[in-house]
Image (tube, rainbow, N blue to C red):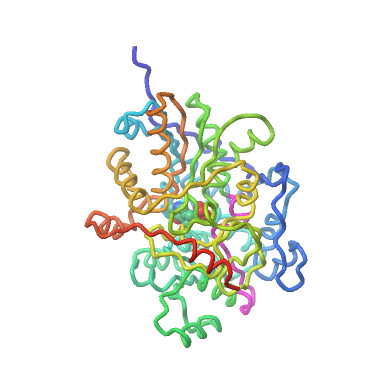
Amino acid sequence: MMMERRKKFLLSESDIPTRWYNITAEMKNKPLPMIHPGTKEPIKAEDLFPIFSEELSRQEVNQTDAWIDIPEVVREKYKIYRPTPLVRATDLERALDTPARIYFKNESVSPVGSHKLNTALPQAYYNKIEGVTNLTTETGAGQWGTALAFAAKTFGIELAVYMVKISYEQKPYRRSLMQTWGAQVIASPSMSTKTGRKIITDTPNYQGSLGTAISEAIELAIQTPNCKYALGSVLNHVSLHQTVIGLEAEKQMEMAGVYPDVVIGCFGGGSNFSGISFPFLRHKIVGKNNCRFVAAEPASCPKLTRGEFKYDFGDESGHTPLIPMYTLGHKFAPANIHAGGLRYHGAGSIVSQLLKDELIEAVSVKQLESFEAGILFAQTEGIVPAPESTHAIAVAIREALKAKEEGTPKTILFNLSGHGLVDMSAYDQYLAGDLTDHEVSDEEIQKFLATK
Ligand SMILES: *Cc1c(COP(=O)(O)O)cnc(C)c1O
């Protein structure tokens, strides 16, 4: 007799987590502290107050409280799209003819189309209750900017977004979304900051980069009264907020009556990977299990698989504290691949420590393999994935095919960090055969790592 195969595992609103999970409190080897570039002293929460909300600054350095309450107002707003579904990818399984069970957590159902709203809402909220009236941020492909635009509007804060110039020109729809939610969007480099003016003067046709946009956003925040800066990845408080993904998935996998053998997330700065992984990794740290955790990064920006573990700046011009991380060097200029959200030179300090301690693994995926995976996923499960998310799908497919080869069933869980409906120009190029693989040479990596 065939056992019924359930497709979706849905929770109710009362199942939305009431607390975020702070993994650093339970890590045996704590992540190294961020360091002040001038004094070389470890960063304390107060040192971050000029840039970030005070509560977010405290969360950033908190290594003692394993659980942090989600403010009731934020939890209410989470109800707009949470809990998100956990789905069994039965049609993908069939297409691969694999004995593996594949599950994905569908974060693409958020109104902004990605997981980024999970941290945008609390970030806007804490700033609001501390009396901040204006926020600045940067955005590459536009996902973070759109998430923060909606969150800022929700809590009545003005937002200025520095958007990497090439995306501003080539991806007009995320700009329109940010403007629809009331944000001011500025192409970066711009004439509105010292950093921007210098770059435009030196290199008039510069197409912009995430590093430059971060520098501009921080500069504006520091110089404007009642204005703070917000970041959508890399930092510890961002990973903390994203744990709602894994905490829900933990309950849903239980409903499905299975436990993952491998958990997969695509990797830009680490926030969605952290979000899906940390609640399961907790079982490995405080208990005992053999679950594997795999971060999927693009071959063209391979900080985890080919970078170096060291202190480096989070932005191109060195405005941020020094962060202990796997990095390709803060001057690294990644190829212009379509997974814009994965084009970041470094990794968060928690995931970096976990990788160093071999509690997690990392693999890289080339652009063409990622799009092939994205197309197969769209044609079987119906959702067009974000170009970033296709990296996680590609690794899930690799694992499922390995299971088939070995003839052993296994349970795979990956995070679908977002949908690709605003990225169809990337799919157009893939379908037209115009996409290529980019890989960086060892010489190039060494050159950027050595650049101060
Ligand atoms: C921003 C983004 C990413 C990469 O960021 P992480 O912090 O590594 O999660 C991945 N997927 C989507 C859909 C994104 O918007």
Q: Is residue 226 magenta?
A: yes
Quadrant holding the C terminus:
bottom right
Does the image show residue 107? yes
Residue at (56%, 48%) from the top-left corner?
242
Find residue 87 and report its image quarter.
top left
Please tell me which residue lies in front, 339 or 272: 339
User: In the image, residue 64 lies at what x, y percent?
Assistant: 75, 47
Horizontal side, residue 191 vs residue 37: left or right: left
Q: In this image, 48 relative to 156: left or right?
A: right
- Residue 321, placed above or below residue 219: above
The reply to whether the magenta stretch includes residue 416 is no
- In this rendering, is residue 72 above or below 411? below
In the image as oriented, which residue stretches furthest toward the top?
1
Between residue 395 and residue 157, name the one nearer to us.
395
Residue 105 position within the rendered picture, expressed as x and y whole percent measured from the top left: 46, 40
Q: Answer whether residue 117 is visible to the viewer in this image.
A: no
Task: Between residue 303 and residue 430, name the one nearer to us.
Answer: 303
Please report the bounds of the magenta region as a residue range.
Answer: 221-241
Quarter of image, res 405: top left
Q: Position of residue 161 (x, y in %)?
A: 49, 70
Figure label count:
0
